[in-house]
Image: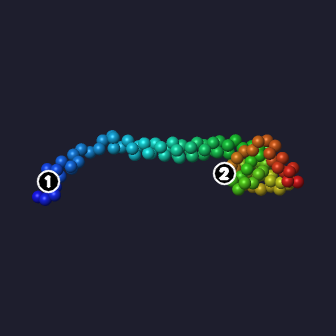
Amino acid sequence: MSLFISDAMAAAAAPTAQPGIEGMLFPLAILAFFYFLFLRPQAKKAKEKKQMISALNKGVEVVTSGGILGKVVDLDDNFVRLEVGDNTFIQVQRQSIETLLPKGTYKAVTKKGS
């Protein structure tokens, strides 16, 4: 027997039921929030990049992940050959292509640089 808390009060304070679906709503809401905020946009962006890389062809103007501007001269399954200057070519992996540029961007930049 305790002098400060009666035995009846201590027994009544003990939990008698397990939390049901109400206890799972908040964690599920957090998971849904993170899915729509982080995972879904990343998957969508990866899908768009995969489509862009598969649609590459000769003559397209691109920027690599390193920031190199070039025009696609030749390509195969894994690599792309870019013209980055007058008779200057580099070969990069397909996955390093970040963006496609509008037609004429490469020509305008090379004229300005000359």
Q: Position of residue 102 (x, y in %)?
A: 76, 42
Of callouts 1 and 2, the N-terminal one: 1
Tag 2 secondary structure:
helix
Q: Residues within 10 Å of mark 1 (few under 14, many from 20)?
A: few
Task: Identify the residue shown where x is 57% and y is 46%.
Answer: 42
Task: Identify the residue shown where x is 64% and y is 45%.
Answer: 49
**In the rendered image, the vertical position of residue 87 relative to residue 104, given as above or below:** below
Colouring scheme applied when the structure was drawn: rainbow
Task: Identify the residue shown where x is 83% and y is 54%.
Answer: 85
Q: Position of residue 100 (x, y in %)?
A: 72, 45
Q: Is residue 88 left or right of residue 37?
A: right
Tag 1 secondary structure:
loop
Q: Is residue 59 left or right of residue 37?
A: right
Is any part of residue 18 visible from this angle? yes
**In the rendered image, the vertical position of residue 59 relative to residue 90, given as above or below:** above
Q: Which mark is residue 95?
A: 2
The Cα atoms of the two marked residues, 1 and 2, are separated by 71 Å
Q: Amino acid at mark 2?
A: Gln
Which of 102 and 53 lies nearest the eye of the viewer?
102
Q: Is residue 42 left or right of residue 80?
A: left
Q: Position of residue 84 (x, y in %)?
A: 80, 53
Is any part of residue 78 visible from this angle? no
Residue most extreme to the right = 114
Task: Identify the residue shown where x is 75% and y is 54%.
Answer: 68
The answer to whether the residue labelled 1 contacts the one labelled 2, judged by CB atoms less than 8 Å apart, is no
Q: Residues within 10 Å of mark 2 (few under 14, many from 20)?
A: some
Q: Amino acid at mark 1?
A: Ser
Q: How many marks?
A: 2
Q: Position of residue 15 (x, y in %)?
A: 23, 48
Residue most extreme to the front = 4
Which residue is labeled 1 in the image?
6
- From the image, which quarter does the N terminus lie in? bottom left
